[in-house]
Image (cartoon, grey):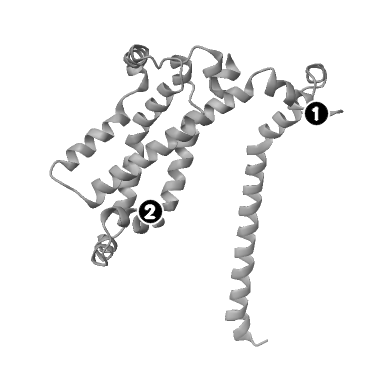
């Protein structure tokens, strides 16, 4: 090796060093993510281990010990005797329609506000978004009296209607902003080809909006499923409880 090569390393050596450095960084990233994932799922593992142990074994040996004997009867008892099947059914009956209706209305309103503006549409858009700034607690008493007056109190309808009403605002905001990022030329080209507005929305805009719809559906489903306030206010009988309230009561 000449003296000049020792002073000025070759491009090949530089490439090897860069690959080694990049590989080291990737290893550290994956190692960190693995540790974080393990920490994240650790409480879930504790719950799973506890769920197949007897109460006496939990009191004697603690939560984080492996069960000496797996007791699958715990699941059968909680599913039948604790009415978890009823609570789960009610939660699905509330969550699925509320998610579907709120996203559908959000898609329609978002498309109109982003692609079909009209005089006063901005003011109407602000009015729709106003629902984001109203705390749900301030309307509980009026809603309770209203649902009781029309005879739907202690049914699943008050929860579905309320979740849809409050969910339209966030759904409209997210879908309107996503639709606004889609070039207007795509809509105009579809109209030139003979498509009407409904065909443009369902056959052109929605197929490219699947990521936004997936995120919105996940958020809405999580929010509605985990809701505790509306079920405990608008239901009274145990047969109408959702899973979040049923497990507490």
Residue at x 64% of width, y 19% of height: 83
Picture residue at 56% right of the left edge, 14% below the top: 238
Q: Whole-percent x and y of residue 42?
A: 68, 35
> Callout 1: few (<14), some (14-19), or many (20+) C-alpha neighbours within 10 Å?
few
Label 2 belongs to which residue? 206
Residue 25 in the image: above or below residue 245: below
Left or right of 155 on screen, residue 178: left
Q: Residue furthest left?
A: 119
State how many labels appear. Answer: 2
Above or below, comparing residue 215 to residue 65 in the picture: below
Q: Nearer the viewer, residue 73 or 53?
A: 73
Q: Quadrant of the C terminus?
A: top right
Q: Give the image location of residue 14, x and y in percent.
A: 59, 75
Q: Position of residue 188 (x, y in %)?
A: 24, 63
Residue at left offset 26%, top offset 31%: 130
Residue closest to the eye, 224 or 95: 95
Front-most of residues 128 and 85: 85
Between 238 and 223, which is closer to the camera in this rendering? 238
Q: Nearer the viewer, mark 1 or mark 2?
A: 2
Element at label 2? helix
Q: Is 227 situated left or right of 82 in this image?
A: left
The image's mark for residue 196 is none
**Displayed quadrant of residue 6:** bottom right
- Identify the disc placed on residue 65: 1
Residue 204 appears at what percent x and percent y? 35, 59
Q: Is residue 247 left or right of residue 165?
A: right
Q: Which one is earlier in the sequence, the residue at label 1 or at label 2?
A: 1
């Amino acid at each position: 090796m000449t003296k000049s090569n020792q002073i000025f390393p070759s491009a090949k050596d530089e490439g090897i060093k860069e690959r080694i450095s990049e590989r080291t960084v990737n290893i550290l990233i994956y190692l960190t993510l693995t540790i974080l994932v393990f920490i994240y799922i650790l409480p879930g593992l504790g719950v799973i281990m506890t769920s197949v142990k007897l109460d006496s074994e939990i009191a004697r040996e603690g939560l984080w010990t492996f069960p000496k004997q797996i007791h699958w009867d715990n699941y059968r008892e909680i599913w039948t005797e604790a009415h978890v099947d009823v609570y789960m059914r009610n939660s699905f009956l509330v969550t699925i329609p509320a998610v579907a209706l709120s996203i559908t209305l959000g898609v329609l309103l978002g498309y109109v506000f982003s692609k079909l503006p009209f005089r006063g549409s901005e003011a109407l858009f602000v009015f729709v978004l106003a629902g984001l700034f109203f705390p749900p607690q301030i309307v509980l008493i009026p809603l309770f009296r209203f649902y009781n007056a029309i005879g739907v109190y202690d049914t699943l309808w008050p929860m579905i209607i309320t979740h849809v009403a409050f969910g339209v605002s966030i759904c409209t905001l997210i879908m309107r902003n996503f639709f606004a990022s889609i070039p207007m030329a795509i809509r105009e080209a579809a109209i030139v080809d003979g498509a009407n507005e409904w065909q443009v929305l369902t056959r052109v805009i929605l197929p490219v909006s699947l990521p936004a719809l997936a995120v919105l559906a996940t958020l809405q489903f999580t929010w509605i499923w985990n809701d505790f306030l509306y079920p405990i206010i608008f239901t009274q009988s145990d047969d109408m409880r959702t899973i979040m309230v049923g497990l507490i009561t």
